[in-house]
Amino acid sequence: MRILFFLVSFLLVGVAQAQFRLPNLDVNRIIDTAKNVGKATLEIGEKDEISIGNDMAARLLGAAPLVDDPALQQYVNRVGRWLAAQTERPDLPWQFGVLDTADVNAFAVPGGTIFVTRGLLAQMKSEAELAGALAHEIGHVLKKHHLKAIQKNAQAALAGEALNLALKDQRSAARDKLLSAGSELYARGLDKSDELEADRLGVVIAARGGYDAYGLPAVLQTLQSMNAEDSSLALMFKTHPAPAERLEALDKMQPTLERYGSQPQLAERFIAELKK
Ligand SMILES: [Zn+2]
């Protein structure tokens, strides 16, 4: 319950802070943007990245709440934060949550909030597999895949100053359009190249964290062996390349996989933690 409270209060604090924060925008850029109404390309800074992520996380939590199991939430946070600490963005407000749904999936929002579903956890056999899946999502955050896609979608829907307004004013209609562009993304998926890049990063980050590098490939193999008609896989399969294609792409990483393939899987610890 403590983690749940922490996560919820974090989201609320994030919203409140963003509301009262003075817009952190470069004046010259605003003038440039105003001159180029219609083709604005605004760089979204880290504070706005985190604030947009908090709003997106709140929307995802509205669709499926967190599992009410503090020990499980703490365990997944320990693994996720350990992995995130090994990356080039260790100082983001990383947090990890298990969503209470039988759907098999995982999500990352901009700024470092990552969710894995109860349904996906149930398919895993070791901590190395959990690490591989979390590290894939961490890869999306590091490369700002969702942020860039949300920005691109929003720019199509919001001309010129409207994107500035969406960042400055959380209660604006422009903000709502920005978040709708984000929600659409979680139903439609990222570009295939982003997914394959997150897979490569996932293998590297998990290996850097000391885990068997085959954790993520093992999860993909499990997904491949499941019945593709299973409705719990529908959204995952709609928003990601087929597991076979992802495994084939990871084949190019054979030297890395082999080099770090004998690091611990921690299957017993994983099973014990899930039973707690
Ligand atoms: Zn992904």
Image (cartoon, rainbow, N blue to C red):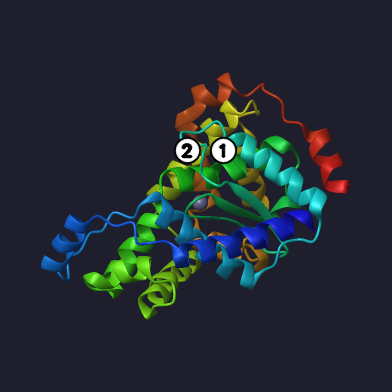
Give the residue pinned by disc 2. 89
Report crowding for label 2: few under 14, some 14 to 19, many 20 or more residues within 10 A (C-alpha). Answer: some
Does the residue tagged 2 have its C-beta within 8 Å of any atom of ligand 1? no
Residue type at tag 1: Ala
- In the image, taking residue 82 as reference, residue 178 lies left or right, namely left
Quote the CA–CA distance across marks 2 and 1.
Answer: 7 Å
Comparing 40 with 152, the one in front is 40
Q: Secondary structure at mark 1?
A: helix
- In the image, taking residue 142 as reference, residue 203 lies left or right, namely right
Give the residue pinned by disc 1. 84
Q: Is residue 115 visible?
A: yes
Q: Secondary structure at mark 2?
A: loop
Residue drawn at point x = 76 percent, y = 41 percent = 125
Task: State the image coordinates of residue 29 (x, y, percent, origin top left).
Answer: 19, 57
Examine the rendered structure and indicate whether residue 68 appears above or below residue 216: below
Residue 196 falls in image quadrant: top left
Label disc, if present, on residue 205 of the rendered structure: none
Residue drawn at point x = 38 percent, y = 76 percent = 177
Residue drawn at point x = 50 percent, y = 33 percent = 87
